[in-house]
Image (cartoon, grey):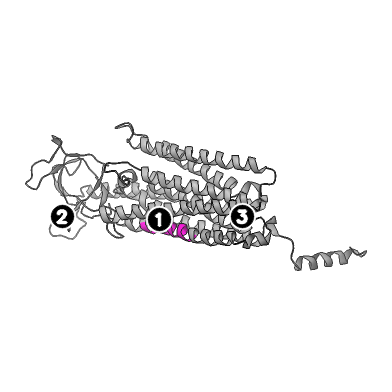
Amino acid sequence: MTENIHTDHAQDDQNLWGGGKEPFKASYGKLMMWYFLISDAFTFSGFLIAYGALRFSMPTWPLPDHVFESIPFYEGKAPLIFVTFMTFVLIISSVTMVRAVQEGHRENRNGVVFWMILTIIGGATFLGCQAWEWTTLIVKENVKLTKNPFSRHMEDGVYLNEDGTVAMLDGKEETIKKGDSYLIHKHGEEFSLRKYRVTDGPDKGKVKQLSFGPKAFGALFFFITGFHGFHVFSGVLFLAIIAINAASGVYAARKNGYEMVEKIGLYWHFVDLVWVFVFLVFYLL
Amino acid sequence: MSGHLTYEESKLVVFKGLRLLAVITLLEVFIALIGNGHIINGFHLVKWIMYPLMISLSLYKAYFIIYEFMHMKYEVKTLAMAVLLPMTLLIWAMIAFFSEGNHWFNDRNYVRTADKIEVKESITPQGEHKEPVLEIQDVH
């Protein structure tokens, strides 16, 4: 450095103007990816806050372990099993992603491509599962954006047949307990809005009909899981592009420990993280 | 870059992470199912035991994913703070608004019971007397 003290500072500032000192010791690309992830976290939190505030305010909101009971290839009820499987798929794909990043740090091109392909398969499996879930809800259970046949009983009662007699199920009266979730089934073009008689509470003795559940259910579910699914889809696309680039040697030439793989790895883990919270808020709480 | 871990050690951390996340997920689902009576018929847990348990398990999963998988443990501390502080505030916001929704639930109950109370002086326009009936489809 020069002998004169005040020119020292001038030299330093000129050096900084020329760049070369990374804030947070992180490269530009990595830092920008983190900033994007923070902004995306705000977006998802906004949606989950809207969902949560509405959901907990409505007594007729159907319980998730009643709505999400179907699994492929099985006709019975398996509450929450399928979404647990989807969670495992994403967790495993996150693990394969970390392995890809580790192989990138060793400049091991084949290792990177291998583990990235496994991650892509995981992501695609998740998308397939989500598509199955949506199809079941829309086609079999008739949940639409503004119509929701899932609801909850607000009082005890007993179902009635068309002629007014008490409905029987397996030899016993088909009773209703307050808080039970129900689904209005559709036969052909018509929803069967079954009648029931209230057996307790201030409306005792009245005959009522099943009513549809909170309208917000469909819109919130499809929009939030759709938005997350869109992130998984774009993640799979980016993973494919970067895997192809890695295989062609683009990143080997940069000699930076396959930093691009690390950056897309951050995005992929974020997608997994969002799913952890969507899974918690939508299916567990 | 996990500077102080060897390649072999890093691989072990990853698979330990897989087992950890898998076990915690199963635990969360188990709590949800047992609390809603699916495992032992008729058995119910109160919400204020189930919810804090499931939320803290999920937060632990999030901590693990961010710190190990996303490498935050090995980053400069100020970067970690720049990311984690907003995310912590978001978690707070979420919990606060869920609780708010619960307050609206209680308010609805209060309004509904208040509607059913017989009033001596009529404050509605004179005409056909209508009993308050729960006739609104999806908003109670």
Q: Chain of mark 3?
A: A
Please give the chain letter of the residue carrying mark 2. Answer: B
The label nearer to you, 1 versus 3, is 3
Q: Amino acid at mark 2?
A: Lys
Residue receiving disc 3: A109
For label 2, the SS is: loop
Q: Specify whether residue B19 is in view.
A: yes
Q: Secondary structure at mark 1?
A: helix
Quadrant where the N terminus of chain A is found in the figure: bottom right
Residue of label 1: A225
- Closest to the observer: A114 or A183? A114
Instruction: Residue A141: tell me if it is visible.
Output: no
Question: Image point 29% across, 32% down: which residue?
Answer: B42
Q: Which residue is mark 2?
A: B130
Q: Horizontal and vertical percent for residue B12? A: 60, 39
| Relative to A50, B73 lies left or right | right
The amino acid beneath tag 1 is: Thr
Query: In which chain is the residue bearing label 1?
Result: A
Query: B72 and A213: which one is in front?
Result: B72
